[in-house]
């Protein structure tokens, strides 16, 4: 049960109320990361409502957009307290696939949870993934896919990451992803729901 006014406002998709509360709290000296935590609690609630069928994809996207607007204000302030970030995560939609809806929701949830997310966009080559993992020394890489025809693209990318000697954990996500696909492509983790991505990231970074 949510008790924080900001968490409740974002979960209820009250856009103007969220913007007002964020500004109000910053003005009264509340730490930016604390505000992000309140927003994240509300987003997690919206994710739960989506999983139980109370919210549809439209509501989840709207919640993500409200979060995004808040992060435009909060992110520059968080960069100053970078030590509080939980760590770096590289994420992208694999080569041959240009869908980014699911990826964008996961990115917002991860940012809201205090991670520094390096979003490579869509149609990302294996070389780009490898470059980013090396540059940011990322312990976790997320690969999003919607098209079943891009399964081999995931497998090739994971093979290339391993061949490059990188021991980063690989999380794959998408509407048809299951344990069979995970085993086939050689990923460490799979996620069907956007909220799973945060749970898995927390597991890896808290290990």
Image: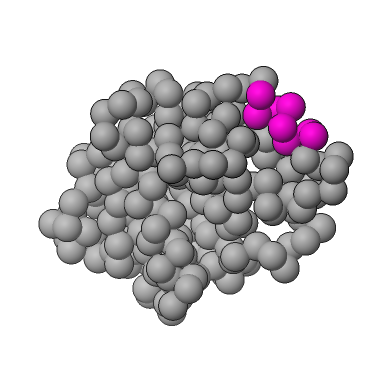
Residue for point 59% across, 66% down: 87
Residue for point 35% across, 52% down: 196
Residue for point 85% across, 43% down: 28
The image position of residue 22, as x and y in percent, is 73, 36
Quadrant showing the C terminus: bottom left
Residue for point 18% across, 63% down: 183
Quadrant showing the N terminus: top left
Magenta region includes residue 31 = no
Q: Is residue 206 above or below residue 196?
A: below
Q: Can residue 23 be seen in this view?
A: yes
Left or right placement of residue 185 versus residue 100 in this view: left
The image position of residue 151, as x and y in percent, is 24, 48
Left or right placement of residue 16 versus residue 144 in this view: right
Which color scheme does this rendered protein use?
one colour
The image position of residue 95, as x and y in percent, is 39, 45
Left or right placement of residue 123 versus residue 77 in this view: left
Residue nearest the observer in this picture, 184 or 103: 103
Q: In this view, does 135 lie above or below 8?
A: below
Residue at the limit of the structure toward the left, as seen here:
180
Q: Can residue 94 be seen in this view?
A: no
Quarter holding residue 108: top right
Quarter holding residue 187: bottom left
Residue nearest the observer in this picture, 52 or 5: 5
The image position of residue 21, as x and y in percent, is 72, 32
Magenta region includes residue 20 = yes
Magenta region = 17-24
Q: How many marks?
A: 0
Q: Main secondary structure of the magenta part?
A: helix
């Amino acid at each position: 049960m949510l008790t924080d006014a900001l968490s409740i406002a974002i979960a209820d998709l009250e856009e103007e109320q969220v913007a007002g509360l964020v500004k109000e709290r910053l003005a009264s000296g509340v730490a930016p990361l604390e505000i992000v935590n309140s927003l994240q609690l509300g987003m997690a609630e919206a994710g739960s409502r989506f999983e139980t069928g109370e919210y549809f994809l439209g509501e989840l996207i709207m919640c993500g957009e409200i979060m995004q607007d808040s992060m435009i204000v909060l992110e520059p302030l968080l960069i100053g307290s970078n030590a509080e970030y939980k760590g770096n995560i590289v994420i992208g939609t694999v080569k041959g696939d240009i869908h980014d809806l699911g990826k964008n929701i996961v990115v917002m949830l991860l940012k809201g949870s205090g991670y520094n997310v390096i979003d490579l966009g869509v149609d990302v080559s294996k070389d780009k993934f490898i470059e980013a993992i090396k540059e940011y020394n990322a312990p976790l890489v997320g690969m999003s896919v919607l098209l079943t025809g891009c399964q081999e693209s995931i497998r090739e990318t994971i093979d290339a990451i391993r061949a490059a000697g990188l021991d980063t954990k690989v999380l794959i996500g998408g509407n048809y992803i299951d344990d069979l696909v995970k085993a086939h492509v050689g990923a460490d983790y799979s996620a069907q729901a956007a909220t799973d991505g945060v749970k898995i990231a927390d597991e890896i970074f808290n290990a």
